[in-house]
Amino acid sequence: MAESTNHQTFVARLEKLAAAYSKRLADDFNHLTILAGQLEEDPTYTQSLQQLHAALHSLAGSAGTFGFVQLGRQAREQELQVATILEQPCNDKQPLPVFEWIIALQKALKTDESKKSAVRIETSRIESVGGEPVIWLVERDTMLAEYMVQQLHSFGFHIRHLRDAEALAHDKGSLPDLLLIDHRASHLEALRANPVTFWQQHLKDFTCPVLFTGSEESFTARLNALRSGGQSYFVKPLDMINLASHMAQLIKTKDTVPERVMIIEDDKELAQHLQRVLEEADMHVTVLDRADALFEAMHEVNPELILMDLWLPGVTGTEMAALLRQVEQWSQVPIVYLSSQSNSELRDQALLKGGDAFLEKPIDPDLLINLCRSRVKQRRKLEDTQNRDSLTGLLKHASIKEALDYQWQLTQRKPQPFSVVMLDIDHFKAVNDTHGHAMGDVVIAAVGTLLRQRFRSTDRLGRYGGEEFTLVLMDCTAEHAERMVNNLREDFAAIQFTGGDNPFSCTLSAGVVDNQHFPDDTAESLLNRADQALYKAKKSGRNRVYLAKD
């Protein structure tokens, strides 16, 4: 089947990459031997010391990534010793036992090779998907860069590799969403002399988040990264799961979902003006001019904020607020009163009776926009705290079921397709038993990161319980959902996890159903059908998606 062929292609690519790295190690040892000879003749030869430091830095950063853990640790210890020597005056430099170091590195390599059979470093499809966040990776180690590109592609990032810091200045294309930089990615002496000034100069034209990487786990390295403009510093060998999650959080600081605002105002000209102002700010705005249509409109729009005139025909704004506060699902919706009366006592009374803010007419457009954004942002943060699983960032069990119920009710009034997916990590108990529950949490968190990266902001994604997940995909047929979930399944199988010194990967199974194939089903019935489809996917061999049809 096609999925099997794709997986075989992934494995073949991994094996090729692992074999190429093993071959490169032989070249690295030859290079170290040459440098050892040069330093034996002249221990104070700065150029050879700098080359030795660069070679050990590269080895320390890449070896652990490819499964050679002991080799990476040994190289890092030696790199730190060379760095100390380089900081000393020329005449004070002591000879380094580089030949002995090489022997120690070779022993570490043999230890690693005896522990590992075949390093499974899985990759994903390389073609980029429109809308993926664009990351510029600045990394001099091309093989490590290739590995990072493959892994980050699995999480939905489009990676552009730049060889060194100088490439940043020459590139005139569209700017990235994030920069991921090895803090020693330049051969220029200026970087060694003053790394903070060097990176500040090279990054002055970039406004996106910056993350630095390096093999040094030291206070100085982290402080330099911070002063250079970096949001964080990641130590090699890189924990790609943690890195991808951190990148996703940084990139999504700007909310991509438009704020849903309802205006309740009987002055049509004013309502239209406020609507235009907010829509220009990319908000989704609904105008309601009849108080008796309140509950119907609330069901349809589910607003995140209400702008309401304090005086409406036949009813007051405070009475409308009191009615809304009686309904649990709308009791926390922020309400901003609008009034042409400048009266502090009136304002105070209105706020005491269910209001969150009070604006006097005429209303300043900038104040209106900022107030709406601020209130909606606060509401979303509160909802996230209450409704989201702390490990994955996805909706909790009760919240994802509520999201499904809401979507089903919405389609009863306005028919449109939506799909329900039940997703499960295959053989998850074996992961916990073999690698421990902490690593099991890492795997679950990786699914959460992948889901948040791969699906739209309008989709509802939840952790149903344990290693099981539920997706409610808006305006999406089962066939389309099946394709998306299959892509997700392949991407997840391409992620490498490291339990101790042993890399491993996991797979997913899923069941998919939509409301078009089963138009008479309730929300609960659709969920049960998706769960039954998941069961069939498991019984059919796992690592597959089963589509439920009538």
Image (cartoon, rainbow, N blue to C red):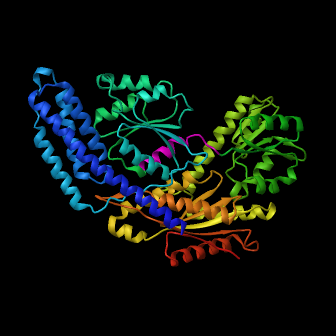
In the displayed structure image, the side of residue 76 where residue 283 appears, left or right: right
- Expressed as whole percent of the image width and height from the top left, the position of residue 350 reads 75, 41
Magenta stretch holds residue 392:
no
In the displayed structure image, the side of residue 121 where residue 106 appears, left or right: left
| Residue nearer the viewer, 467 or 56 | 56
- Expressed as whole percent of the image width and height from the top left, the position of residue 386 reads 56, 55
How many numbered discs, if any?
0
Q: In this view, does 529 lie above or below 348?
A: below
Q: In this view, does 303 lie above or below 484?
A: above
- For image coordinates 67% across by 65% down, the residue present is 479
- For image coordinates 79% across by 37% down, the residue present is 338
Magenta stretch holds residue 247:
yes
Q: Residue 269 lies in what quarter of the image?
A: top right
In the displayed structure image, the side of residue 479 where residue 208 appears, left or right: left
- For image coordinates 25% across by 37% down, the residue present is 55
Q: Can residue 87 be seen in this view?
A: no
Magenta-highlighted residues: 242-256
The rendered magenta stretch, by its main secondary structure, is classed as helix
Q: Is residue 129 visible?
A: yes
- Expressed as whole percent of the image width and height from the top left, the position of residue 124 reads 48, 55
Q: Residue 549 lies in what quarter of the image?
A: bottom right
| Residue nearer the viewer, 458 or 301 | 458
Look at the image and tell me in which quarter the C terminus lies: bottom right
Q: Is residue 127 above or below residue 87?
A: below
In the displayed structure image, the side of residue 512 where residue 279 appears, left or right: right
